[in-house]
Image (cartoon, rainbow, N blue to C red):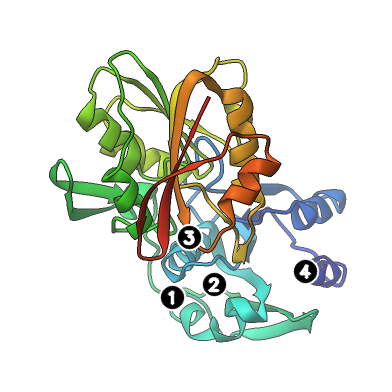
């Protein structure tokens, strides 16, 4: 609402680009005012880097959670903006919007606050010729980290903003140590595959399994396809993208429980509810969540059999549900 109100006082005079805004309010307001609008989101199945030729007069950036991801978006904006083009960055105060000034200054001119309200802020700056050059293209932002994994030491690819960027997180590591038995030919889905750790772990113990990764982040999906060669990764949130593909013999997951910076168990609830139809008869789901979550209660609410605790270490527990 803050950005839409500010647009009412002065619209871009040329093509506009909206980066990583999960809501369509800003793009809709621009389009309704007759502005040519393009947008980019890592949630796309093919998150191709936007034009890096200075063809835009205005770029809007919704402040992301991760600092490294924000740096990547600033390079996108800097490459997309014509000299003198205007950048708007907007976000909540508790997301760090008040401290972005020093990150903008290497690319842009003086930073000004255009609007505040509702515990949020909108700041703006213009692209200047003396600004540093933009790093353009996804390949420029792909990073390979040398990791010691249960099946060996490997180079593991990721992008800024992917879950557990550059490391194996503690919860996934616990589940990798307690994967369910997988028979050759079993149909396996890694729900929320991220950059592919669990899918790779299943392949290491059973190369003959038919594994599919399901992941809402298109950049994580790109990394997973490199990390697990030949892995089919379906991009999308929830179980919907797998509708019509039949039931699964094995489900493994470290399910997400954040939307932006907000922690919500709705994502875990959607995962659990989907198991009632996605698991084949005699199928098994094994997944990891933080031990503070009331998992038994939520599984019961989803209509699932009582889950069995498989492992308990630190803040994490591995659970199993069978049909």
> What mark, if any, has residue 3 been given in the picture?
4
Question: Which marked residue is nearer to the observer: mark 4 or mark 3?
Answer: 3
- In the rendered structure, which disc, 3 or 1, sits on the residue that comes first in sequence? 1
Please tell me whether mark 2 sits on a helix, a strand or a loop.
Answer: loop
The residue that disc 1 covers is 131
Question: Which marked residue is nearer to the observer: mark 2 or mark 4?
Answer: 4
Q: Marks 1 and 2: in contact by CB < 8 Å?
A: yes
The residue that disc 3 covers is 291
Residue 97 placement (x, y as % from top left): 61, 79
Locate residue 82: give its quadrant.
bottom right
Which residue lies at the image location 34% right of the left edge and 27% below the top edge?
231
Distance CA(mark 2)–CA(mark 4): 19 Å
Q: Is residue 108 left or right of residue 163?
A: right
Distance CA(mark 3)–CA(mark 2): 47 Å
Question: Which marked residue is nearer to the observer: mark 3 or mark 2?
Answer: 3
Distance CA(mark 4)–CA(mark 3): 39 Å
Which residue lies at the image location 55% right of the left edge and 85% below the top edge?
99
Q: Mark 4 Cα within 10 Å, few/some/many (few <14, many 20+)? A: many
Residue 242 placement (x, y as % from top left): 57, 24
Query: Which quadrant of the rendered structure holds the N terminus?
Result: bottom right
Question: Which marked residue is nearer to the observer: mark 1 or mark 4?
Answer: 4
Residue 59 placement (x, y as % from top left): 63, 62
Locate residue 18: give its quadrant.
bottom right
- In the rendered structure, which disc, 2 or 4, sits on the residue that comes first in sequence? 4
Question: Which marked residue is nearer to the observer: mark 3 or mark 1?
Answer: 3
């Amino acid at each position: 609402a803050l950005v839409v109100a500010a647009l009412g006082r002065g619209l871009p005079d040329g093509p506009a680009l909206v980066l990583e805004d999960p809501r369509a309010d800003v793009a809709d307001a621009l389009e309704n005012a007759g502005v040519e609008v393009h947008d980019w989101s890592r949630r796309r199945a093919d998150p191709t880097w936007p034009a890096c030729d200075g063809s835009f007069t205005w770029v809007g950036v919704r402040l992301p959670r991760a600092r490294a991801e924000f740096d990547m978006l600033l390079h996108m904006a800097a490459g997309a903006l014509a000299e003198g083009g205007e950048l708007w960055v907007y976000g909540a105060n508790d997301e760090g919007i008040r401290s972005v000034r020093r990150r903008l200054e290497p690319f842009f001119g003086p930073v000004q606050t255009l609007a505040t309200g509702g515990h949020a802020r909108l700041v703006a700056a213009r692209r200047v010729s003396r600004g540093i050059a933009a790093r353009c293209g996804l390949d420029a932002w792909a990073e390979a980290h040398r990791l010691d994994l249960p099946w060996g030491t490997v180079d593991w690819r990721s992008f800024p903003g992917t879950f557990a960027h550059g490391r194996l997180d503690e919860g996934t590591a616990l589940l990798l140590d307690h994967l369910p038995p997988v028979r050759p030919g079993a149909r396996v889905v890694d729900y929320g595959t991220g950059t592919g750790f669990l899918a790779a772990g299943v392949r290491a113990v059973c190369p003959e399994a038919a594994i599919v990764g399901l992941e809402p982040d298109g950049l994580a999906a790109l990394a997973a396809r490199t990390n697990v060669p030949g892995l089919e990764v379906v991009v999308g949130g929830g179980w919907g993208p797998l509708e019509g593909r039949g039931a699964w013999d094995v489900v493994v997951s470290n399910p997400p429980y954040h939307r932006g910076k907000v922690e919500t168990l709705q994502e875990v609830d959607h995962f659990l509810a989907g198991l009632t139809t996605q698991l084949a008869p005699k199928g098994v789901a094994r997944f990891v969540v933080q031990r503070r979550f009331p998992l038994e209660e939520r599984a019961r609410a989803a209509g699932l059999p009582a889950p069995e605790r498989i492992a308990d270490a630190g803040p994490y527990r591995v659970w199993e549900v069978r049909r």
